Image: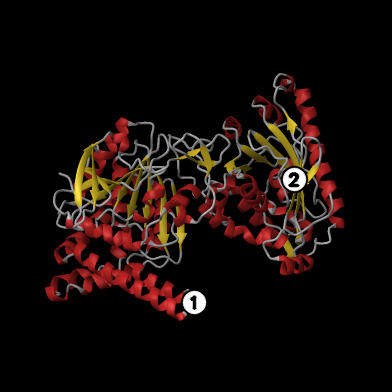
Amino acid sequence: MFMAATGAVVFPAGSSPIFRLQISPPSSGNFKSKRSVLERVSVSSTEQTPSSISENGRLEKKQESGGRVAERGGDAEAEYGLLKLKDYLEQSKDMIRSEGGPPRWFSPLECGSRLNNSPLLLFLPGLDGVGLGLTLHHQRLGEIFDIWCLHIPVMDRTPFTDLVDLVERTVQSENCRSPKRPIYLVGESFGACLALSVAARNPDIDLILILSNPATCFSKSQLQPLFPLMQIIPEQLHFSMPYILSLMTGNPLKMVMATVQKGLPLQQTVGDLSKSVGALSSFLSVLSDVLPRETLLWKLQMVRSASAYANSRLHAVKAQTLILSSGRDMLLPSAEEAERLRHTLAKCEIRKFNDSGHALLLEDGVDLVMIIKGSSFYRRGRYIDYASDYIPPTPSEFKKVYELHRWSEVATSPVMLSTLEDGKIVRGLGGIPSEGPVLFVGYHMLLGWELAPLVARFWEEKNIVVRGIAHPMMFTRLREGNLPELSTFDSYRIMGAVPVSATNFYRLFASKSHVLLYPGGMREALHRKGEEYKLFWPEQSEFVRMAARFGATIIPFGAVGEDDIGQLVFDYDDLMKIPYFKAGIADLTEEVAQLRTDFEGEVANQDVHLPIILPKLPGRFYFIFGKPIETKGRKQELRSREKAHELYLEVKSEVEKCIAFLKEKREHDPYRGLLPRLIFQATHGFDSEVPTFEL
């Protein structure tokens, strides 16, 4: 019943894991298995340092001594020891050598110690059936999931419906064991059909589907011509079939092309190219072993039946679904299929990878953990808790997010000022408390231009994740339309943005987070001409009493500089005078949930539109965080609406003073313009901090 697999915990499908197979290479070079009994919760390796999330929202690693050190620095490989395609090939060979028996589950040992109450993730493989399609992601996924992978031996001939029964039994068993915990089904190609079929038969179980290039469109596949070809091709020529499949999946060929395109010195290019060609040869060898002629024919027939079975039951799928579609999938028309499924399934989102091939999850640069976090698909209960389910970005994740927005910091060279408790203004964030709860309340620049440099600087200088209270349009849509796709906002969600609601506000304070609030909201970020630096705050003191309830420190802040990077040419009032744009604004507004519908005045104007802006040669952004205002010990006092409103007006006044201070001081900054900054950096180094006005 058990299989000796390198670095894997193996157990029969549908049962609980009670054995771990430890493989150690003896001196002879052969692998030797050792069987040891362990508890169910100890499936993963216990030798790795577990990650934890501190109360203030910072990602930390626990030391064996019980102390904590912040996890900073290093790239993705240094942090996680990410595997490469060659590791997938080597492990696949080991799995194939240990063939025999029925389909079964295994849990990779490189999946490290995970967070408490981590949900179960069942990986359902593609055509190969090996079950190692998540090899490049095991270690990172293993920190937040309990991972089981389905292995279907090469010579196994279990019908598709029996595989559905097998996965269904596991899902039902685990749901009975932990009914409040969601179960993730990650299906690749054929495995996606399996996941959809199980979900259709179990609509009342809390399932989350993550489907990579689903084979539900197999009837339109480039593989269709292989059926008659397989019937007549001589056995001696079967070696060509894996070669054709490898070219269509794209991975080895992509490795070779990437090596050529790096632009490295000739000697290094030749060396890397030889390694890539070697990987291609290994890939073909493994593919030939995994898919011998009879197995390939059987599996192609099974994919055809799986596609038909799943398609006939799509109407019954109620599970939350995320589809990962490749733009250069030569096996399946995945991009078109993703759109079809989005319109067919009840709760479905798409993430597009336009330059990727069919074997998406084996490509370098595809980070499944970031995809799950960015799409807000990670939760440990029936509903997502944006406070307790949030996992702060790792240094490598922050680096990837920062690269998307780095232009704003490079172009504007932000000046960050903060105020100490004694009222002294200093450069940097020295006046910001490290421990929460803290509430930052300030002015929202046009289109929120200040967000990227603000959030990035807090991460880099203070190791603090600022949890921004955001408009619901970044998380959901009422209907499809012309607004940017939800994936546009994935980086904001990774960096901690949460949809605005009293519940989320409460939970963030309870978790001692650093929270960012713009009372002016969309009206302030989409202000009209001549309204730069004007606050559009509601009359009600929305946040004061909530902050006082948790003793949060309120820090008012101001930000200026939007008028130095762009000029507003057509604002809302101008656009509403043009029938074409007026109709477009109405359509955009109907796509999103409306806020402050019970308010009156300008603050209630939440129409969604995109103003027309004329860019300028970039000036400079300036931030100042005012003196912290303590609410600790004032809970009873601030229960009074009058007292709360007084504090609200005090905070608003401080924000206006911060803005006025920056507008006056920037006039004395010799480096306000782009050219002086470039000259300074050219002579002092581009990583050097550019000076500013005297404090």
For marks 1 and 2, the one nearer the N-term is 1
Report crowding for label 2: few under 14, some 14 to 19, many 20 or more residues within 10 A (C-alpha). many
In the rendered view, tell whether residue 592 sits above or below residue 669. above
Residue 228: x %, y % from top left: 18, 71
Query: 610 or 358, which is in the foreground?
Result: 358
Which label belongs to residue 263?
A: 1
Residue 174: x %, y % from top left: 30, 35
Which quadrant of the rendered structure holds the N terminus?
A: top left
Left or right: residue 582 versus residue 356 is right
Residue at position x 27%, y 53% in the image: 131
| Residue wearing tag 2 | 443
Secondary structure, mark 1, is loop
Residue lying furthest front:
27
Left or right: residue 25 versus residue 133 is left
Rendering colour mode: secondary structure
Residue at position x 69%, y 22% in the image: 635
- Disc 2 residue type (three-letter): Tyr
In the rendered view, tell whether residue 482 sits above or below residue 469. below
